[in-house]
Image (spheres, rainbow, N blue to C red):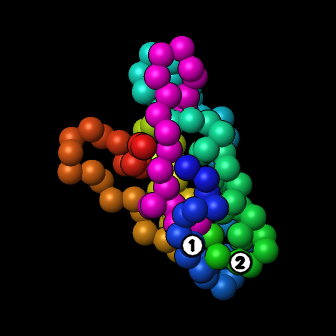
């Protein structure tokens, strides 16, 4: 999913780039399903760009990532979900609600 298709949320006044948690390196997986790194990285960059420009940020809770399977390396979902919850809080958004389906995946996978 392109982050251009995501709903946006205004960034509260006074939020600066220095207030945002640094993403660092996410652990990766090839054995278990993961999130596509390029999609996660694009969402994070779009949020940072919104804070820098003062424009609206993508709605982090509405983020959807295509799954990785097999030999394709992906970011471990739990590490990404934890970071995105921290990022959501830093930009005044609600953290992603926990799913009711028992999968443990917070961000929807397409």
**Any mark on residue 16, and which?**
none
> What secondary structure is found at the residue carrying circle 2?
loop
Q: Which residue is mark 1?
A: 8
Residue in front for this viewpoint, 56 or 89: 56
Residue 74 seen in this snapshot? yes
Residue in front for this viewpoint, 101 or 16: 101
Above-or-below relation of 107 to 38: below
Q: Do the residues under discs 2 and 1 have CB atoms within 8 angstroms?
A: yes
Sequence-first tag of 2 and 1? 1
Residue 26 place in picture, x, y as percent: 59, 34
Above-or-below relation of 57 to 81: below
Q: Residue at x 30, y 53 (%)?
A: 98
Q: How packed is label 1: few (under 14 Cα within 10 Å), some, or many (20 or more)?
A: some
Quadrant in the picture for residue 13: bottom right
Residue 102 place in picture, x, y as percent: 21, 41
Residue 49 place in picture, x, y as percent: 75, 64
Above-or-below relation of 102 to 42: above
Above-or-below relation of 70 to 7: above
- Highlighted magenta segment, given as a residue range: 58-75
Residue 71 included in the magenta stretch of the image:
yes
Residue 76 seen in this snapshot? no
Quadrant in the picture for residue 51: bottom right
**Any mark on residue 55, and which?**
2
């Amino acid at each position: 999913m392109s982050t251009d298709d995501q709903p946006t949320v205004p960034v509260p006044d006074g939020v600066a780039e220095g207030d945002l948690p640094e993403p660092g390196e996410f652990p990766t997986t090839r054995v278990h399903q993961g999130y596509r790194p390029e999609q996660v990285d694009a969402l994070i960059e779009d949020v940072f760009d919104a804070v820098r420009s003062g424009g609206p940020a993508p709605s982090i809770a509405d983020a959807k990532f295509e799954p990785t399977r097999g030999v394709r390396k992906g970011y471990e979902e739990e590490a990404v979900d934890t970071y995105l919850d921290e990022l959501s809080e830093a930009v005044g958004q609600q953290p992603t609600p926990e799913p009711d389906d028992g999968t443990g995946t917070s961000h929807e996978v397409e």
